[in-house]
Image (tube, rainbow, N blue to C red):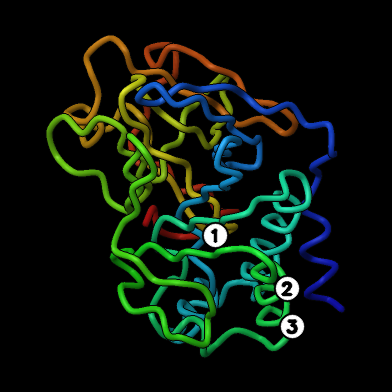
Amino acid sequence: MQRQEAAKRVISSPADAAAGDVVIAGVALKIDPLGALIHEAERMLIVADLHLEKGSSYAKRGVMLPPYDTGTTLARLAVLIARWSPRRVVALGDSFHDNSGPERMAAIDHASLSALQAGRDWIWVAGNHDPNIPADAGGERLPALAIGPLHLRHEPRPGAQSGEIAGHLHPIARIAGRRRRCLITDGSRAVMPAFGAYAGGLNIHDAVFEPLFSRGRKRAHVLAEMQVFEVCATRCHPEELIRPIAWGMSSK
């Protein structure tokens, strides 16, 4: 009960929350304020970097975090699935904080995950944290996925990559003094925000983003509580690596 109540307290996602629009490699997508992409034509929901069982992974090393991250993340994912009724869910890697994460999941969280997977295709794209997700996590495992001109993978590749949608870097922007998760794109490719409750973040002005996007065309789609705001990346306050305490202790 304590686990369920902790998850409910962090979810404030009315059904009428306003999604943002984005076009990547000519494909029209929607950005949900909770941090997912929706490909309506394919009835596909895309999330990145769930980092399930990050809390228990840190606990194994003696760093005690509240053990509610998995329940909270799955509850937020349930809101998305109820809102968009996807035929397919694609998780872009680092879905578990390590390969043994599914073994540490509580029974209630296993049941929640199974319920979310029921009646739809579920694809785990391999990440650097979880290259070998065990079979008992359900779903299908792929190194990457191509859907028309879109190429879904965990880690962005160097150089021009038209249609690439990736995670891994956990972009965050600072707007009006507040640090918020965001999706960044130049219209050709995109890097998604981390979805996990304990996932940290990397400021979009970090040098790692520079070779990925066309100069002057990078836009930040900033997630607020009930809607998405598109801003020019240059309007986001520069700041070094951001690790919000509420989201954990590491950016990846």
Mark 3 surroundings within 10 Å by alpha-carbon count, few (fewer than 14), some (14 through 19), many (20 or more): few
Q: Quadrant of the N terminus?
A: bottom right
Q: Nearer the viewer, residue 197 or 87?
A: 87
Q: Earlier in the sequence, mark 1 or mark 3?
A: 3
Please tell me whether mark 3 sits on a helix, a strand or a loop.
helix
Q: Nearer the viewer, mark 3 or mark 2?
A: 2
Residue drawn at point x = 25 percent, y = 44 percent? 156
Q: Nearer the viewer, residue 68 or 91?
A: 91
Residue 228, percent from left and from top: 63, 25
Mark 1, residue position: 198
Under mark 1, the amino acid is: Tyr
Above or below, 100 against 198 in this view is below
Residue drawn at point x = 49 percent, y = 56 percent? 90
Mark 2, residue position: 115
Please tell me whether mark 2 sits on a helix, a strand or a loop.
helix
Q: Earlier in the sequence, mark 1 or mark 2?
A: 2
Please tell me whether mark 1 sits on a helix, a strand or a loop.
loop
Mark 2 surroundings within 10 Å by alpha-carbon count, few (fewer than 14), some (14 through 19), many (20 or more): few
Q: Earlier in the sequence, mark 3 or mark 2?
A: 3
Residue 138, percent from left and from top: 54, 79
Left or right for 212, reference 83: left
Under mark 2, the amino acid is: Ala
Mark 3, residue position: 108
Left or right for 6, reference 50: right
Left or right for 59, reference 190: right
Residue 155, percent from left and from top: 27, 51
Above or below, 83 against 245 in this view is above
Mark 3–mark 2 distance (CA, rounded to whole Å): 11 Å
Under mark 3, the amino acid is: Ile
Q: Quarter of the image holding residue 206?
A: top left
